[in-house]
Amino acid sequence: MAKTASIKSFAVIGGDLRQVYLSGLLAADGYNVFATGFDREVEVSKDVIRLRSAEETVKKSNCVVLPLPYSVDGLTINAPYARAPITVEDIIKAAMPGTIIVGGKLNDEIIGTAESAGIKLIDYYQREELAVLNTIPTAEGAIQIAMEELPITIHGANCLVAGFGRVAKTLCHALYALGADVTACARKCADLAWIRTLGYNAVNISDLERTVGKFDVVFNTIPAVVLSEEILSNLKKECLVIDLASKPGGVDFETAGRIGIKTIWALSLPGKVAPITSGAIVKDTILNIIDEEVAK
Amino acid sequence: MAKTASIKSFAVIGGDLRQVYLSGLLAADGYNVFATGFDREVEVSKDVIRLRSAEETVKKSNCVVLPLPYSVDGLTINAPYARAPITVEDIIKAAMPGTIIVGGKLNDEIIGTAESAGIKLIDYYQREELAVLNTIPTAEGAIQIAMEELPITIHGANCLVAGFGRVAKTLCHALYALGADVTACARKCADLAWIRTLGYNAVNISDLERTVGKFDVVFNTIPAVVLSEEILSNLKKECLVIDLASKPGGVDFETAGRIGIKTIWALSLPGKVAPITSGAIVKDTILNIIDEEVAK
Amino acid sequence: MAKTASIKSFAVIGGDLRQVYLSGLLAADGYNVFATGFDREVEVSKDVIRLRSAEETVKKSNCVVLPLPYSVDGLTINAPYARAPITVEDIIKAAMPGTIIVGGKLNDEIIGTAESAGIKLIDYYQREELAVLNTIPTAEGAIQIAMEELPITIHGANCLVAGFGRVAKTLCHALYALGADVTACARKCADLAWIRTLGYNAVNISDLERTVGKFDVVFNTIPAVVLSEEILSNLKKECLVIDLASKPGGVDFETAGRIGIKTIWALSLPGKVAPITSGAIVKDTILNIIDEEVAK
Amino acid sequence: MAKTASIKSFAVIGGDLRQVYLSGLLAADGYNVFATGFDREVEVSKDVIRLRSAEETVKKSNCVVLPLPYSVDGLTINAPYARAPITVEDIIKAAMPGTIIVGGKLNDEIIGTAESAGIKLIDYYQREELAVLNTIPTAEGAIQIAMEELPITIHGANCLVAGFGRVAKTLCHALYALGADVTACARKCADLAWIRTLGYNAVNISDLERTVGKFDVVFNTIPAVVLSEEILSNLKKECLVIDLASKPGGVDFETAGRIGIKTIWALSLPGKVAPITSGAIVKDTILNIIDEEVAK
């Protein structure tokens, strides 16, 4: 990845291991990298300059990188390795006009606040390429869980992937590659056509109830209760359910518990299973954002 | 594929080998199939009832299947195996109200004419699932040409696929599977992310000129002149160019000819390389259309 | 798998979860299955008839299945779920002439003892198909460990597989399928040719020292100290070493520990990571043995 | 490929396009390359020095490369592009003691003659790595034929590969990768285990008669009449048979002709479908031979 013109210094503020690795990767690319919020239990690249003061860190940089999510409470930066809290407000105040601040899962309010101060605030979690590349650690994390939980190999296992969005595509690809018997279910004819084209078994969601009894493991990627009581009660009792869908989840957990279907709700896998890869994905996305901003 | 409710009889009118096979596949599914326009040199399934008169064929059916494209001149049905011309007007006149007529590459005028007569006329070539499934014979046709033309194996060949739409995705998949060193080029960050996720080399189109010299074969899928003089003159002289893009094509053919780059413009591969598979794809698409119409 | 002629009843004696599942799978195939040695903490298929007495179990059967390994001490059957010890001698004494006894890792002495009593004793662990099929759970177990230990995804990881025997072949296949950058090293020209043919990077073992510095993870399959001090000291310090080689192992563990290379010696993975699949593999192998014995 | 110590000059004598390309590839590696026997219709690299006299060509070199096969009649070199015949005797006579002569399909007599003259004569066609690497162009050639002949795509086709030797392994791999439904048949339990491990359907040859009716194409790799009258008469009539087995072939051609099964006997595919790749494979093999001879 070439050094992006006109950005020379990055401030990396808080976050988990992904941010720690991200700071090292930016430094390895040749940028000046200042960091704050990595005070304990964590090894930071020696090419990264660590500062006590968040304000100072921000002032030295023309791009500020906040974590994913940037904050849990909306007031302080999400910084599990920091000794003292870092407030969002202090970061924005410290930034000079012209500074680009990037962060994950920003809310509209903070974006408005920044823009009125002449600061460009951009949410990298909204970027399609980040979502695409994050399917890799998500799929591997899901497969790792299946390997750990199942008394059979993935090779030869009857696997259902519910949905055929981004995560499902990468997950099907990996399961198939490992020799699983992969079925994906979807509703749209075009999705079902892609499923057949890629060599998987295609099942229309409306036929799921009838066919679901053969699966050894079900991976759900649809953020709606696809695994309803009707579907769950047709699963074989040893079937493992891994739910990758965010927010409400895709499983009627109450019913699953009652009838004894083991269900694992696996969220935010990328940062957990592969923090270096995830940090690199965020880095690539940020450099894309800067390229586009600079080109404006 | 289950028998679609309420449609009992199909009329298959004209077309090439795809239509011939399609008529047999519908009959094998248990439908009554009447056909006209297959008079010579062609073997039709004995379960298909062949009639002389197109009008009679249409009247016996509640779904009429026209070929892809339905017509070359806009007046007569595209029917290379027919002894006498079959006019589009006669087909529409013969259809009872309530009949569904499906065909490929219909123009707006004929759709209007039909609708004013109470006939539903639907273009299956507009269906996304047909476009997706047709990527399979298109990709295989392109690979067959490369195998025939190149003095090297696909395994180990440096292959560039320009674009990352439907055809490109399936073509990259197949080339990679055969052991080629696959590079795909695109402009959008999300496409480049998918290219990396799937294991291919990703090149931004803006960097193409600089990197194009290493390829043994270039497959273009972009319907715009991507392979301009600048790009062509950086290819090595033995490089083969296979252009899969429709209409204007993606190659500056004049320049390619002048500097001696062998270029093959390969259009309409599905019907040529795999007429049975292509007929089956059209059949599946038509049954999807009928399902949706019946559900209305 | 068809029911093998002339064998009607199996005795399953002791062993771990693999034997438990194996007993259920044989019963599901329609055989009479008697079992002993599964007294606690273990759920046995209700189609398996459990008996207290090992002698009685043997007498009711014309094929006796001992575990893998059949014994740890050479005197008693390896039976972790049994309440009381079962002696090897009692089993052999109880068997009628004509009975086939199969077990894993039998020693010559016990085979001799049995034959002099007119009992056929066959070691299924010697069978090539068992070794081949066991590469699947071994490879998946190795990948699971790598996923658990590495802060990066397998996709994109630089992986070295040392050796190109059975396990290495299946492991390379799976790693490559997951999108890893796979290098295999071997000594023989023919092995190196297969490595290239399958699309992996081929390195001659004699060049390993020079090239080993780029790998994120090394899987050893060679039962000789390939990862000597010279090689280990050229690894990058974050590199993970997973040793799959039996007996002496393939790593100079003392040096690895001294220079801080994390090394995991992963033995007997099939029974640990996928006891059902492993039980099924043993079952298929035993049925092959019986087919051949019956055909004699 | 590093320059092999102590060999400085190669003589390339006769042969088809493979030898032509081979001469260019050796020259590109930095060797002095002299060639004879490429007089017409053929473009030779300008880095290769072409000589009229075979004797002179041999004398200037310390390694002489004869074609594959080295001779058709045992007396003259197989040299389709030569104007005048080149005798084998003259080549051997011209070689100085210490010269290495390599060629393909040498007979024992000529090896004896050479050795008594102090010349080392080595058959590269006997080398395992050449056989392995040649499976790549063989498999691609077989697939090209299937693509050209079949009215269906390889994707989704029911393909049988008879045998599971070298060619079969690579062919199954490529067919499976293209999305075919691949079945391989073999007799040995270990081969059947590998077939299952790699994800293909495994059929015991003894069950072939019963299962052969579903295939769209059969590739034979076994040099014995596997496709006997019993098997052929159970094929569906549109099934295509591609025989890759040498010498007697694996098909009862007379019966196939009588019952109307289309059969293609495809021999010596590497040189036909991919002469550059084949030339490179011969080159790599020759350099391996020299390495081993020099190390002696």
Image (tube, coloured by chain):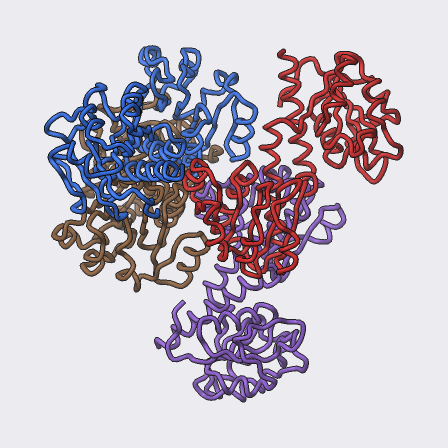
Chain colours: A blue, B red, C brown, D purple
Q: Choose between B92 and B137: the one closer to the eye.
A: B92
Residue C147 showing in the rendered view: yes
Percent of width and height locating residue C239: 23, 48
Q: For the C terminus of chain A, which image quadrant?
A: top left
Percent of width and height locating residue C256: 16, 52
Q: Choose between D28 and C292: the one closer to the eye.
A: D28
Residue C278 showing in the rendered view: no
Percent of width and height locating residue B291: 63, 17
Q: Quadrant of residue A27?
A: top left
Residue in view at x 50 percent, y 23 percent: A186
Relative to residue A85, is residue C160 depicted above or below? below
Residue in view at x 59 percent, y 82 percent: D88
* B229 lies left or right of A280: right
Relative to residue D42, is residue C256 depicted above or below? above
Relative to residue B39, is residue A210 depicted above or below? above
Q: Quadrant of residue C162?
A: bottom left
* C12 lies left or right of C177: left
Residue in view at x 48 percent, y 50 percent: B208
* A294 lies left or right of A205: left
Q: Choose between D144 and D68: the one closer to the eye.
A: D144
* A131 lies left or right of D115: left
Percent of width and height locating residue D265: 66, 56
Q: Choose between C17 and C157: the one closer to the eye.
A: C157
